[in-house]
Amino acid sequence: MIAHVLQPTLKRGLAIVGKAVASRYHLPVLGHVLLRAVPEADGGPYIALSATDLELHIACKLFATVERSGAFTVPARLLTDLVATLPPERIDLEVGEQGDALHLACGDSAATIRGLPADVFPQAHTMLPSTIIGTFAPDVLARAVGSVTFAAADDESRPVLTGALFHAEEDALTLVTVDGFRLAVCRSAFDEPLGQPVREIVPAGALAELSRLLAEEEHPVQLSLDETTARFALAGGAGANEGAVLDIEITSQLINGNFVNWRQIVPQSHSTQMTVDVEAFTRLCKTASVFARREVNQIALDVGDSANSQAVTVEASSVEMGDYVAEMPARIEGDALRVSLNVGYLLEALGTVRTERAVFTFNGEASPIKLTDGTDDLVHVIMPMHVRG
């Protein structure tokens, strides 16, 4: 293999696929990145990068000059760290006839990296053309994914909750996550209906990586799906990827199981409703988080107390740091109450609201708290905590 690529291009490509490199692995090759040089005669020229932890596979193509085709794997962390220190110049890559090392040269620097043959690298699951079910506008997909992935569980003993329900039908996409303490739902409309309805559980980690890349995407994102696997294909070539990276693919195993009946978790009635300015309320909650008890991240909300029935008071206390109290106007309907909740969960939910005002509904101090943007398209449910004092 002999190929030449610009340092910023290789650096960008390694950053894209690097998130799929296994952090803990029993096979050394899972800590490697695969480089495959494809000449113009075979559809190039480009260098294809791939990384996988066996559940998530990320691949992309880099603009490059290829003199001789070939493929090789090298330790991903070593190559990434090395390339980051090189000047923004042309990098020459070569794997010799013996095929046991990658020789790299850039400016006055030269390095030899021991690696493994390409044929031991796990290949991505093959997706037939018939598995393509449609495309999504990148902004629609980005908003949906960014609104829910943080509410997925980390507990691997309940694998279904570590994923997001990916439900698309007719002209709408609904994503849902739940971790036992909170629930997030985002429904987004799209212009072109899919070829078939979809209801699968996609790992939240894979969707988080997709969200990271969607910020640079301008073209529709293609979704392929079969019984075990989902693949999101991005065109690339825009933003930070312009003139550098094309054809980004994120391939993920689906999670097998039955997702929870999330509609039963969303409160259908309430005794109190509070409408607040999102920016002002978020600012108060961020300040309160500084004082919140570090071990539980807890704050209290006094909603429509006797002193001012159209205000909400935000309180936080810490034995080590002291107390915090702030009040702001709110439109409140129904009973006054005091409720305690995790301020981290609250701030993450507020961060997804794109309207000027957010609507909270309560059904007493011990019942789940519902937060929306005033519509049913964005819904967060947060379990309350025990009220202190």
Image (cartoon, helix red, strand yellow):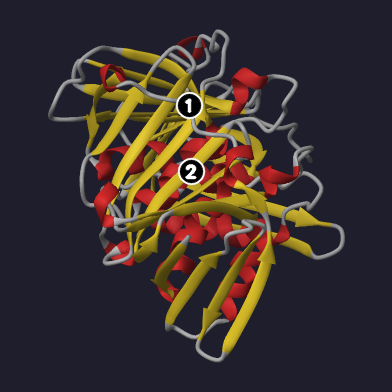
Residue 155 located left or right of residue 211: right
Residue at the (48%, 45%) spot, across then down: 209
Residue 297 at x, y percent in the picture: 72, 47
In the rendered view, would you say 135 is above or below 38? above
Q: Which mark is residue 125?
A: 1
Q: CA distance from mark 1 to mark 2?
A: 11 Å
Q: Tell me the SS state at disc 2.
A: strand
Residue occupying image coordinates x 55% and y 35%: 56
Q: Position of residue 345 (x, y in %)?
A: 59, 41
Q: Foreground residue, 51 or 306?
A: 51
Nearer to the camera, 324 or 230 = 230
Residue 306 placement: quadrant:
top right
180 and 80: which is toward the camera? 80
Q: Is residue 274 above or below residue 157?
A: below
Residue 35 in sight here:
no
Q: Residue at x 60, y 40 (%)?
A: 121
Picture quadrant where residue 353 is located: top left
Label 2: which residue? 58
Q: Does 9 appear above or below 315?
A: below
* Residue 372 showing in the rendered view: yes
Q: Amino acid at mark 1?
A: His
Tag 1, which secondary structure? loop
The three-letter amino acid code for the residue at tag 2 is Ile
Which residue is found at the position 63% from the left and 70% from the top? 81
